[in-house]
Amino acid sequence: MPCWIALLRGINVSGHNIIAMKDLRLLLEDAGLKKVQTYIQSGNCVFTSTKSKAHLSKLIRQVIGERFDVDVPVTVLPLAEMEKAIRDNPFAEQGQASPKSVHLYFLNSKPADADLVSLSGIAKTNESFQLKDKVLYLFAPDGIGRSKLASAIEGALGVSVTARNMRTVTKIAELARSI
């Protein structure tokens, strides 16, 4: 059965959209997903299902909305797509030294008219980014909390995104491979 990864955006952040991972696992199992596992509290789920990517994204968003009364964007990826994102990382060397300084922004769709020039204009001298297919890679050695570049990515791309640092992405992929 195919293995999938769901990345929920904006849950358990600064006291908003609080969802316990145990409750989320049970909810997704009740919705028909199999072998559901979660990683840390920020909404990273792995599971198996024969349903399509589009169906899974809609289903997960719907059941979360109904059960927890929150509307959170859900990015669903097959394991192979996440593994490709890891392999294609242009900042792999920097990520080896500091995995929390490399962030992967998973796009829900390919941007029609990404404004990468404006992103380049606000990047600090030690920040770098690269857009490959439906993943924007960001190297931000000072972190993303105060990064103007990080906060401008979604607007410049014009599509919904959710980001995870390289350490988290690697752990999610390892978890997915184990189910």
Image (cartoon, rainbow, N blue to C red):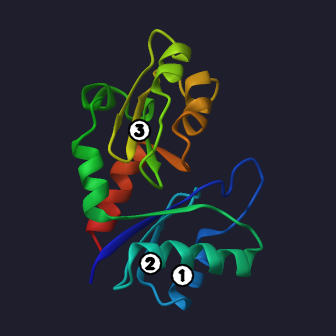
User: Answer yes or no: do the residues labelled 3 and 2 have beta carbons within 8 Å?
Assistant: no
Q: Residue at x 78, y 53 (%)?
A: 15
Report the residue at 31% width, 25% height from top: 94
The answer to whether 81 appears left or right of 169 in the picture is left
Which numbered tag is attached to residue 28? 1
How many residues crowd around disc 1 within 10 Å: few (fewer than 14), some, or many (20 or more)? Answer: many
Please identify the quarter of the rendering in which residue 131 is found: top left
Which amino acid does the dot numbered 3 rest on?
A: Leu
Residue type, mark 1 in image: Leu
Mark 3 or mark 1, which is nearer to you? Answer: 3
Q: CA separation, marks 3 and 1?
A: 28 Å
The kind of secondary structure element at disc 2 is strand
Q: Residue at x 34, y 64 (%)?
A: 175
Residue 138 x, y percent position in the rendering: 43, 30
Name the disc covering residue 136, or none. 3
* 87 sits left or right of 42 in the view: left
The N terminus lies in which quarter of the figure?
Answer: bottom left
- Of the residues under marks 2 and 1, which one precedes in the sequence? 1
**Looking at the image, how many numbered discs can be counted on the residues?**
3
Furthest-top residue in view? Answer: 125
Q: CA distance from mark 2 to mark 1?
A: 7 Å
Residue 6 appears at what percent x and percent y? Answer: 47, 65
Which label is found at residue 134? none
Q: Are marks 2 and 1 in contact (CB under 8 Å)?
A: yes
Relative height, residue 37 to residue 170 (above, below): below
Horizontal and vertical percent position of residue 118: 53, 21
Q: From the viewer's perspective, is residue 147 above or below residue 61?
A: above
Q: Which residue is mark 2?
A: 36
**Is label 3 in contact with label 1 (beta carbons under 8 Å)?**
no
> Is residue 47 visible to us here?
no
Using the numbered discs, state the Cα–Cα distance from disc 3 to disc 2 in whole angstroms.
Answer: 27 Å
